[in-house]
Image (spheres, coloured by chain):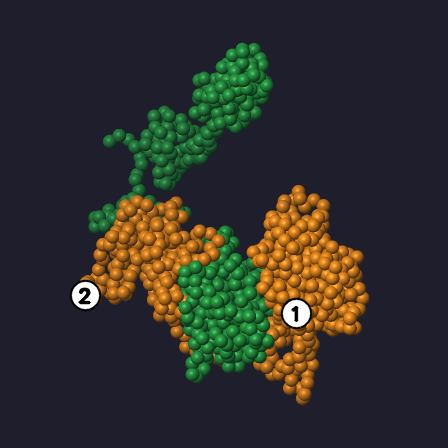
């Protein structure tokens, strides 16, 4: 069996004198052994893993090399010289000259060197003429020096210039300076990486050397699936609501009528949210076939004339507006439906409701706007509830989320009064912020039907994917 | 939420003291406002147009304050200051007074029959002996613009015109004429144009072009003349140049025309209550008599004070506080709702001033009491409401399946419920009419033309966007799709779907098949013909699997997409 690269390396290393001066350059060693440098580096690494057999110190050396284009210039001359040479004494039309290979660069360099002149007014179009009799190809000779290994004799400026023209490349080579280690030996013992059943059966494990584990490397990532992070948050919020005794409302209708989305929530028909700019209206099915007739009559009355202690908005309420279908802009429409059903029950029973589902706004997509996001909504309906109860419920909810410092700001909402925005103090950021970045509107619901409800709604923004 | 920009120093001068930004922010917060931004004209211009353009612009500090959408009385410096000063009990709320001139001396406006079909309502008022300064004048113009953008619904419901009364003479006529019959010099123009020419002139105007559609295709345009035939304005587009107001104007004629009488009255009330502050006789407004085509006359502005009675217990009960009737009355007075206790203390009489048109029911009054009390001073209490929580069965099943699908090595995706018609039809080799999809009428981009009828396009897009990730990609989504359904009250319904996809260099039908088997095992559906599931090849590009009435679109294995 022929000796391994590691063994060859160790044999060479043995011949080097001891002490700090003695050692091998990995580049030279690879050249001497007729090996690829990377192969030798592999051997160095495996020897390092054995412990103190060798010491290796990384070194970086930079070298100048010609690029493919540089090689071409070395062979044929620089573009500016080539162009100069192709211009005869009677001149050359610029359009023809530009068709020559490398003429673009050559022309601008030759002009900068004042080797050529351009006569824009020449008959038959712009024409270029020689401006000097003869030129020296400095670029070519500089490249020749580099090629011959005398790159260092060029000035820094010449080198940068050639580098900028992509004729020269600066190559950094990583190599090792290898020295004998404290446990140097030419005989390499291969360490075992795995304990096998055979080793145990034969008992050979007792004598074999084992390779130490590398704890600084990362382990193998497990193959597994993942839940979507936003939906994990949804699950958490859902869990909190369930812990607090809230029952889930049905929200499985992205399509909603304007009636439930706006009118039933006392949002007047000229409200800006009902603009085409903000809401997705439907072309098909454009209208809701069925609206609750009795309830609709009451809603119409409250909007147009007032009632139930309200002055109303005093405008002409149109059923055609209420029929217009849309993609719901909030899940509060689902809450309105749920409260409507509750109100129709013969006997009132206190309830706590919640929902978390998608809502839609007519936005163009960008980094801060999405046409869809999730809304979190909660409603408590009971007799004798107060704004203090709403705030207490929110406090509990946010405490379960890990946010305990809250501040409430008065806000306006057509369908809830009093309304508020919740601000939370973020301990990490050290400032007050609205949870979920977009604010959380929480409200005391004063439906046209009953007056006992306390509600809270919030938005959970979807992060852009 | 409208944003009002005011100069900080002017604001502090009017408030009679200065604040740090933080102090002022806290005051706003308490009152339900938000100090959105501290900036300057220079900052704004350099942000919008680049630093070079901002050279020479004013560096005066501006406060941008977010005002709740219902508080039209806070849309200018005058209103903000009045609101905050009353809130802080530094001033008493002024009493606005309508002065009705002696018979035959007041201004009149006659509305003709022709307006009915285009802009049937108008109200007007006069501010006498007003003193403008540059700042007051700017604020006057700004307030009109804010009102136009908000309550006036971009001039569709109401349009405001203000005129120098000394340049015109009543009675005024509000009528509608054919565009060719209207000719006048529009505001800040140097020559006369006909109404049709005016429309062409403003077609490219960045500001006015948005209002042209309100009257453009009507046979007659609304117009207001004085007794000499001078055009005051062509609402809702532009005023005449003849009667334009300036810093020197002493008497202002204000007209509001519109399609909503209630809103027109509110708008006029707001303007006159805000700016009568600068009249010689502060907070007085001269009335104008408006005659409608049916002969009825209205004395404008309305400036109505309305009285409401509220039980102190109601306020305490709604808020969870226990204040005495007199202190509740004091709280309400701080919100510009001047109140006092009546009877044996079992009622509070609340007077709603013309500036507070937003107060339309008792809970508005309760809300204002809460703001004055301070939301953050209210004791938080956990409700005693005892309920047993229930999950929606559909969502419960979804949660259980999601976990098991992730445990089976698939990663959950969350994709848009909206997509293009191409995504659900052409790209899947289906005809759009066969999809039964819900179509959106007004999408801003082609990405959102329809609601998805299948989850597959979303997952395919997820794959396309993640081609850099190491293979294989195994994705799933459990979410709703939407289809038309005439039996539902809105004509459409959601279905909950499950979709999974396996993407690799080589097809792996058995992998997606295995996942299906696992899902069915979890659902306790056996793989047999009688009472379970079977897979059948279909002609469609997508493999579908059916059991009873349930159709589960199950993704194809990838075949080198």
Q: Is residue A255 visible?
A: yes
x and y percent of residue B441 in the render? 45, 57
Residue drawn at x 69%, y 53% is: B184
Q: Secondary structure at mark 2?
A: loop
What's the mark number on residue B24? none
- Seen in the image, is B126 located left or right of residue B414? right
- Asked where in the image residue B73 lies, by quadrant, the reply is bottom right
Q: CA distance from mark 1 to mark 2?
A: 79 Å
Q: Which quadrant does the C terminus of chain B fall into?
A: top left
- What is the x, y in percent for residue A142? 51, 19
| Of callouts 1 and 2, the N-terminal one | 1
Q: Looking at the rendering, which quadrant does residue A415 occupy?
A: bottom right
Q: Label the orange chain with its letter.
A: B
> Which is nearer the eye, A188 or B273?
B273
Labels 1, 2: one chain:
yes
* Quadrant assignment for the N terminus of chain B: bottom right
At 53% across and 63% down in the image, what residue appears?
A273
Q: Quadrant of residue B406?
A: bottom left
Asked if marks 1 and 2 touch (Cβ < 8 Å), the reply is: no
* Residue B301 position in % (x across, y down): 70, 70
Residue at the spot 71% in from the left edge and 70% down from the top edge: B289
Question: Is residue A142 visible in this depiction of the protein?
Answer: no
Q: Give above or below for B429 relative to A106.
A: below
SS of the residue under disc 1: loop
Pointer 2 local density, CA inside 10 Å: few below 14, some 14–19, many at least 20: few
Q: Is residue B394 left or right of residue A294?
A: left
Give the letter of the green chain. Answer: A
Can you give x and y, in whole percent of width and height, for residue A181 in the image? 40, 36
Residue at numbered disc 1:
B292
Mark 1 — on which chain does it sit? Answer: B
Give me the disc on residue B530: 2
């Amino acid at each position: 069996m022929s000796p391994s690269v590691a063994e060859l390396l160790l044999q060479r290393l043995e011949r080097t004198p001891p002490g700090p001066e003695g050692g091998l350059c990995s580049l030279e060693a690879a050249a001497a052994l007729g090996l690829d440098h990377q192969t030798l580096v592999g051997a160095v690494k495996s020897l390092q893993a054995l412990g103190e057999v060798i010491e290796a110190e990384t070194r970086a050396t930079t070298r100048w090399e010609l690029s493919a284009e540089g090689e071409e210039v070395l062979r044929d001359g620089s573009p500016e010289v080539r162009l100069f040479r192709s211009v005869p004494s009677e001149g050359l039309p610029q359009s023809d000259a530009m068709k020559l290979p490398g003429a673009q660069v050559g022309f601008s360099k030759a002009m900068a060197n004042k080797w050529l002149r351009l006569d824009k007014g020449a008959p038959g179009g712009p024409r270029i003429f020689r401006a000097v009799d003869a030129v020296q190809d400095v670029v070519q000779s500089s490249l020749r020096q580099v090629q011959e290994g005398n790159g260092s004799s060029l000035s820094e400026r010449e080198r940068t210039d050639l580098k900028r023209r992509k004729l020269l490349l600066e190559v950094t080579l990583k190599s090792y300076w290898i020295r004998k280690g404290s446990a140097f030996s030419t005989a390499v013992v291969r360490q075992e990486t795995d304990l096998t059943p055979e080793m145990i059966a034969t008992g050979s494990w007792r004598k074999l050397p084992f390779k130490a584990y590398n704890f600084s490397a990362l382990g193998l990532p497990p193959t597994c699936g993942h839940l979507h992070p936003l939906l994990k948050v949804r699950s958490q919020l859902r869990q909190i609501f369930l812990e607090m005794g809230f029952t889930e409302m049905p929200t499985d209708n992205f399509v909603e009528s304007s009636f439930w989305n706006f009118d039933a929530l006392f949002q007047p028909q000229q409200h800006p949210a009902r603009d085409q700019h903000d809401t997705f209206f439907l072309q098909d099915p454009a209208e809701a076939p069925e609206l609750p007739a009795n309830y609709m009559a009451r809603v119409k009355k409250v909007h147009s004339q007032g009632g139930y202690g309200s002055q109303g908005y005093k405008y002409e309420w149109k059923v055609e507006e209420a029929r217009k279908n849309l993609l719901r802009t909030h899940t509060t429409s689902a809450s309105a439906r749920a409260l409507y059903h509750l109100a129709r029950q013969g006997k009132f029973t206190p309830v706590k409701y919640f929902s978390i589902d998608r809502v839609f706004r007519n936005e163009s997509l960008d980094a801060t706007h999405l046409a869809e996001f999730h809304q979190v909504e909660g409603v408590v309906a009971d007799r004798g509830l107060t704004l203090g109860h709403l705030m207490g419920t929110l406090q509990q909810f946010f405490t379960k989320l890990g946010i305990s410092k809250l501040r409430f700001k008065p806000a306006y909402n057509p369908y809830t009064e009093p309304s508020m925005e919740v601000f939370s103090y973020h301990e990490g950021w050290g400032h007050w912020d609205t949870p979920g970045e977009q604010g959380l509107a929480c409200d005391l619901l004063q439906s046209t039907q009953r007056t006992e409800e306390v509600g809270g709604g919030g938005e959970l923004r979807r992060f852009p994917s | 939420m409208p944003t009002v920009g005011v100069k900080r120093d002017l604001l502090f001068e009017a408030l009679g003291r200065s604040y740090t930004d933080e102090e002022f922010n806290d005051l706003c917060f308490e009152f339900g406002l938000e100090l959105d931004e501290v900036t300057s004209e220079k900052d704004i211009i350099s942000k919008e147009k680049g630093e070079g353009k901002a050279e020479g612009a004013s560096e005066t500090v501006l406060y941008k304050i977010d005002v709740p959408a219902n508080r039209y009385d806070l849309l200018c410096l005058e209103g903000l200051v009045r609101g905050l000063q009353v809130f802080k009990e530094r001033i008493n709320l002024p009493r606005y007074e309508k002065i009705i001139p002696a018979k035959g001396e007041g201004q009149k406006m006659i509305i003709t029959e022709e307006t009915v079909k285009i802009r049937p309502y108008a109200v007007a008022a006069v501010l006498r002996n007003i003193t403008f300064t540059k700042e007051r004048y700017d604020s006057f113009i700004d307030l009109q613009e804010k009102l136009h953008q908000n309550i006036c619904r971009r001039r569709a419901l109401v349009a405001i015109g203000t005129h120098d009364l000394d340049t015109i003479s009543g009675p005024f006529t509000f009528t509608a004429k054919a565009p060719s019959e209207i000719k006048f010099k529009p505001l800040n123009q140097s020559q006369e144009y006909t109404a049709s020419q005016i429309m062409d002139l403003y077609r490219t105007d960045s500001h006015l072009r948005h209002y042209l559609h309100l009257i453009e295709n009507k046979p007659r345009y609304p117009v207001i003349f004085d007794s000499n035939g001078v055009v005051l304005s062509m609402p809702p587009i532009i005023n005449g140049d003849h009667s334009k107001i300036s810093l020197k104007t002493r008497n202002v004629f204000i007209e509001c025309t519109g399609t909503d009488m209630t809103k027109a009255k509110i708008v006029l009330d707001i303007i006159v209550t805000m700016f009568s502050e600068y009249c010689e006789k502060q907070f007085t407004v001269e009335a104008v008599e408006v005659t409608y085509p049916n002969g009825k006359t209205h004395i404008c502005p309305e400036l109505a004070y309305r009285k409401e009675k509220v039980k102190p217990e109601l306020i305490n009960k709604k808020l969870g506080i226990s204040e005495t009737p007199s202190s509740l009355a004091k709280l309400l007075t701080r919100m510009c709702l001047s109140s006092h206790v009546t009877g044996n203390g079992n009622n509070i009489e609340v007077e709603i001033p013309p500036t507070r048109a937003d107060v339309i029911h008792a809970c508005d009054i309760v809300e204002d009491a809460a703001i004055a009390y301070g939301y953050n001073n209210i004791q938080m209490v956990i409700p005693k409401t005892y309920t047993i929580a229930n999950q929606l069965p559909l969502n419960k099943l979804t949660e259980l399946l999601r976990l098991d699908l992730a445990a089976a090595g698939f990663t959950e995706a969350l994709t848009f419920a909206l997509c293009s018609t191409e995504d659900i039809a052409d790209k899947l080799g289906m005809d759009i009419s066969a999809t039964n999809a819900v179509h959106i009428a007004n999408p801003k981009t082609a990405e959102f033309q329809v609601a998805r009828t299948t989850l597959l396009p979303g997952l395919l897009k997820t794959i396309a966007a993640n081609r850099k990730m190491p293979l294989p990609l195994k994705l799933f989504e459990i979410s709703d799709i939407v289809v038309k359904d005439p039996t539902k009250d809105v004509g459409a319904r959601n279905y909950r779907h499950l979709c999974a996809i396996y993407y690799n260099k080589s097809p792996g039908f058995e992998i997606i098949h295995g996942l299906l088997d696992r899902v069915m095992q979890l659902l306790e559906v056996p793989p047999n013909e009688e009472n379970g599931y079977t897979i059948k090849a279909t002609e469609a590009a997508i493999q579908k699997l059916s059991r009873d009435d349930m159709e589960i679109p199950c993704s194809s294995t990838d075949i080198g997409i």
